[in-house]
Structure formats: structure tokens, C-alpha cells
Image (tube, rainbow, N blue to C red):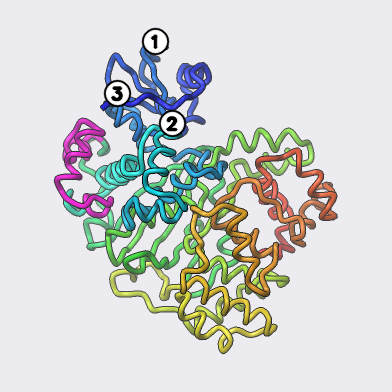
């Protein structure tokens, strides 16, 4: 079936292709009628004639139009589009949830329910905006995960199929053939380093162990994320060694332990999973933790136009906004970190984890972490007993945990900023700072600025910027829609006195 492409600026897209501009990789694909393939904008092949090009916003739309992925540039191997975090419309929220594996776990009905639309309404919106429906978009996501596993591990193809989210071996084989015009075996061979098979790693040594790379657009200040996480690391739950960060993560089917090591253009991932079915969900959470789909060149160029920020941008190019691997954990950290220092917040969270954290199952051990963050139900039942400090803070934590456990408070990437902050602030004891900090980390919003945060104000003063909340807000208007990245530079400037959790 051939579908009409969603409208894109043809001249701008073709200029990016002609210039092999890597900044646009992942933001659209180029389908070439004369060859029947689609490529990333930076494909090194001869630039096709403009008359032969059609541009699609997603690879799924190109699949449905009958095109196959280029074997040379591997368009499935690039970071995702930064538009899904920048935008807040239904299509963008759907893409964030699809990337997190919602369709694999809950089907299209579950995706539609989370977004507040009927399946038919949602289908029309996605086809109009992205050129493909939810099933096709999820299928493209599975294909990308499968390619990752085939070329970077020695997992049997049958394990790859289910780890990538396919429901059957036949569906897996058919999708790989349709998307890549190869068998899984041939795809694995095409991605292996010359002269040897796919690299041997943990996957060949222990069931449930995976080693692969998650790509990032350059520049990538991944070390800054590790520094950020290290300052807040909770013993037993997390561990920092040199430039690597390890932790336990509770996923849909069990607990995983991961070790993460950022490099120039990627994050190296070594993971031990209780269930391989959780792999797509894990990878999506890790991408959000390191903000890997950001467009750092665009952000840096915009911020560096301000002489006061240029030195900071030059010192930390590609600075990212850290996300979270556990939205509920982030809410707990934010509540316990209200109006206290990083050290005090860490002590409070450490006590909670020591008392209530769940031991790791055998399959997830081996990365230096020992326990997972407690569940919302466990926190709700024990918060008032375990947590020290003001009674109002304990009550707020118990109420928030109960709401998450009961499903009345939803913390996921499909929420709008207004809806999430409204629901959080409806809980007594949670104010705008906490709600917006949680939104920053959970939603990955690129345009949030916590002007009331003491470390933000200290960083502004250190850089010679207005530091009073109202004056800082007025100044920051010039940096829309990248105020979250501005805030990271302010926090970085105030590192010795940071107060955010």
C-alpha cells in the first residue's frame, strides 16, 4: 500500500541531504524512487536527484510506502527526533509512549487510553502527522531494537525476536525482510566488524545479559550526566566507578541491573535483565536518562549567541538535561529534596532505600548494585514510619505514593506539562518547584526554568546574569525554547552550592 508523505519542507530537507548534514539524522528519512530505498540525511552515497526524492517524518511511513532501509547508512541506527520532546501535541506524546514500549505491553487500545482518544481518532492523527499508525510505528521501533541486538550481540535470533518485542519468530523474520531486505543472519553479518563475527560479550556468557551502544548526536557531554548522577548516587541502588554509572531499574516484568559508560558519540550499555522482554522498555528509559535524542548543535548555537553563556557552552558542549529511569523514584527524590541541599536529600533517600529497597534477583546481579527502589505501594505503607523530617513532607510522600499505586496519579512521558503539574500540585505539600522539577526529569521538556531554585539563582549570579526570580524569568525569554538547557548551564555554574535533588 502506498501512502502519501506527510508535508515537510522539501527544499530544507533536500539541502540537508545535499550537505549530508548529520544534525538531521533521525528527524526525517529520504526515500529514493529510483532505488526503492530510504536513507538518513547524512548517507554517504551519491546525492539522489531531487525529482527522485520523497521525504518522510518517520521510517515507518517509508516502510508503508514500500521502501527498504539503506544497507549503507542504516537509518534505523540513529538517535530519534528531538521534536518529540520539543512538541506536546498528541502525535509527539504518542511517539514518546511508543518508544517506551507502551504498544508492546498494552496494545493500541492502551496507547489510546493513555492519550485520552479513541483508537480510530488516534489512528487518524498519527497517519496525518507521521504517515503511519501506532502499529506501524511500534513495528519500526522493534526493527530498530532487533538490528541493535543482531549486530552487537551473539544472542540467538530467536531470543532477539522476543527481546525486541515481536510476538513470534515469523513476525520477526517478516519484519526484518521487509525493512532491511535481508534475513536476520545476513543483517547480523552485515553489521559485524570485518574479519570476525559479531563481538562476543555478556550475551554469549549468561542468559539475560546484553551489551550494546546507544547512539547520541555530537557533541555529547555524557560525562556531565555521570557527574550529575554521581552527586546524587544512593548506595546499593547506584554505583559510580570512574566514568561509569551502574544502577538497578524496576521494569514491567522484573528488575534489571545496568552499567552505563558514555563516550564521544554513544553510551555503552551492559545490562542484566530478569526478562528479555523488558529490553525495549529499558533502552527507551536509558535514552531519556541521557537525553540522547536532543539536537545539541542547535541548542548550543542558540545559547552561545549570548556572550554571558558562550564560555559555559564552550566548556561543556553538548550539555544534556538528565532524565530518569524511574518516574516514581524521581517524584520521591523531589519531595525529599524540597528546600534542602543535595547531601541532605541524598541522606533521606538513602534511608528510604536501605529500609525498603528490594533485593536484586539472581539474574540481575553482577554489576555492583544490590537493591531496587521500593515500589509505590511499599513507600505508601511505610513513608510515615521510615522518613524523617517535617510531618507535612512525610504526609505528602505517603499521599503521592498512594496515588501512584492506585493509578490516580500517572507519571509517564505521555502527559502534558499542564496536566502533570496540575495533578502533582493537587497533593497537599507539593508545590510548583517540585511539580516542575519532576516534569523536567520525567517529560524531558526542553523549555523549563525553575527561577525559584536557589542553585539556579546562584548560577545566574556566577555568570553575571540577573538572579532575582522575576528578573531571571524576563532575561530567559530570549532563550526559548531551550530554557531547560540554559538551566543546566546555570546549575553547572553553581556546582559547589547546588540545591536541586
Label for residue 57? 2
Query: Where does the image place residue 472, in percent across and percent down from the top left?
Result: 81, 49
Residue 261 shows in the view:
no
The residue indicated by pointer 3 is 37
Instruction: Label 2, secondary structure: give it.
Output: loop
- Who's the residue at 34% across and 18% down the image? 32
Q: Tell me the CA gap for discs 2 and 1.
A: 18 Å
The residue indicated by pointer 1 is 51
Part of the protein shown in magenta: 161-190
Q: Tell me the CA gap for discs 3 and 1.
A: 15 Å
Q: Tell me the CA gap for discs 3 and 2.
A: 15 Å
- Who's the residue at 50% across and 78% down the image? 353
Which is nearer the eye, 221 or 371?
371
Q: Are marks 3 and 2 in contact (CB under 8 Å)?
A: no
Which is nearer the eye, 499 or 410?
410
Whether residue 163 appears in magenta in the rendering, the answer is yes
Amino acid at each position: 500500500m502506498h501512502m502519501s508523505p506527510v508535508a515537510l519542507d522539501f527544499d530544507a530537507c533536500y539541502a540537508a541531504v545535499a550537505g549530508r548534514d548529520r544534525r538531521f539524522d533521525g528527524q526525517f528519512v529520504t526515500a529514493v524512487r529510483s532505488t526503492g530505498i530510504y536513507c538518513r540525511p547524512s548517507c554517504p552515497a551519491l546525492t539522489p536527484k531531487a525529482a527522485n526524492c520523497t521525504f518522510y517524518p518517520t521510517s515507518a511511513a517509508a516502510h508503508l510506502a514500500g521502501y527498504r532501509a539503506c544497507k549503507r547508512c542504516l537509518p534505523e541506527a540513529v538517535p530519534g527526533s528531538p521534536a518529540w520532546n520539543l512538541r506536546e501535541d498528541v502525535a509527539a506524546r504518542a511517539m514518546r509512549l511508543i518508544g517506551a514500549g507502551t504498544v508492546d505491553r498494552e496494545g493500541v487500545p492502551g496507547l489510546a487510553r493513555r492519550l485520552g482518544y479513541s483508537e480510530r481518532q488516534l489512528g487518524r492523527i498519527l497517519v496525518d502527522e507521521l504517515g503511519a499508525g501506532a502499529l506501524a510505528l511500534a513495528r519500526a521501533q522493534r526493527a530498530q531494537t532487533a538490528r541493535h541486538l543482531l549486530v552487537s550481540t551473539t544472542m540467538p535470533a530467536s531470543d532477539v525476536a522476543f527481546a525486541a518485542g515481536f510476538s513470534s519468530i515469523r513476525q520477526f523474520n517478516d519484519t526484518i525482510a521487509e525493512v532491511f531486505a535481508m534475513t536476520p543472519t545476513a543483517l547480523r553479518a552485515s553489521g559485524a566488524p570485518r574479519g570476525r563475527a559479531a563481538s562476543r560479550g555478556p550475551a554469549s556468557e549468561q542468559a539475560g545479559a546484553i551489551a550494546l551502544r546507544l547512539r547520541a548526536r555530537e557533541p555529547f557531554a555524557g560525562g556531565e550526566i555521570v557527574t550529575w548522577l554521581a552527586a546524587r548516587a544512593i548506595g546499593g541502588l547506584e554505583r559510580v566507578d570512574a566514568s561509569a554509572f551502574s544502577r538497578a531499574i524496576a521494569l514491567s516484568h522484573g528488575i534489571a541491573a545496568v552499567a552505563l559508560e558514555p563516550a564521544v558519540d554513544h553510551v555503552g550499555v551492559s545490562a542484566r535483565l530478569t526478562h528479555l522482554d523488558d529490553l525495549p522498555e529499558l533502552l527507551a528509559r536509558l535514552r531519556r536518562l541521557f537525553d540522547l535524542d536532543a539536537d545539541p548543535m542547535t541548542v548550543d548555537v542558540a545559547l552561545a549567541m549570548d556572550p554571558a553563556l558562550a564560555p559555559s557552552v564552550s566548556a561543556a558542549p553538548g550539555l544534556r538535561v538528565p532524565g530518569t529511569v524511574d518516574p516514581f523514584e524521581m517524584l520521591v527524590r523531589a519531595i525529599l529534596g524540597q528546600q534542602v541541599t543535595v547531601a541532605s536529600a541524598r541522606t533521606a533517600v538513602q534511608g528510604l532505600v536501605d529500609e525498603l529497597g528490594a533485593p536484586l534477583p539472581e539474574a540481575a546481579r553482577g554489576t555492583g548494585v544490590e537493591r531496587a527502589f521500593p515500589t509505590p505501594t511499599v513507600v505508601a505503607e511505610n513513608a510515615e514510619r521510615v522518613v524523617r523530617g517535617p510531618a507535612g513532607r512525610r504526609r505528602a510522600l505517603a499521599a503521592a505514593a498512594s496515588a501512584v499505586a492506585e493509578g490516580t496519579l500517572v507519571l509517564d512521558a505521555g502527559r502534558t506539562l499542564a496536566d502533570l503539574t496540575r495533578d502533582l500540585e493537587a497533593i497537599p505539600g507539593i508545590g510548583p518547584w517540585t511539580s516542575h522539577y519532576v516534569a523536567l526529569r520525567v517529560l524531558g521538556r526542553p523549555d523549563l526554568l525553575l527561577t525559584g531554585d536557589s542553585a539556579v539563582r546562584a548560577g545566574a549570579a556566577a555568570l553575571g546574569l540577573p538572579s532575582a526570580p522575576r528578573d531571571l524569568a524576563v532575561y530567559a525569554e530570549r532563550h526559548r525554547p531551550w530554557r531547560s538547557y540554559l538551566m543546566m548551564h546555570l546549575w553547572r555554574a553553581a556546582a559547589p552550592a547546588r540545591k536541586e535533588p
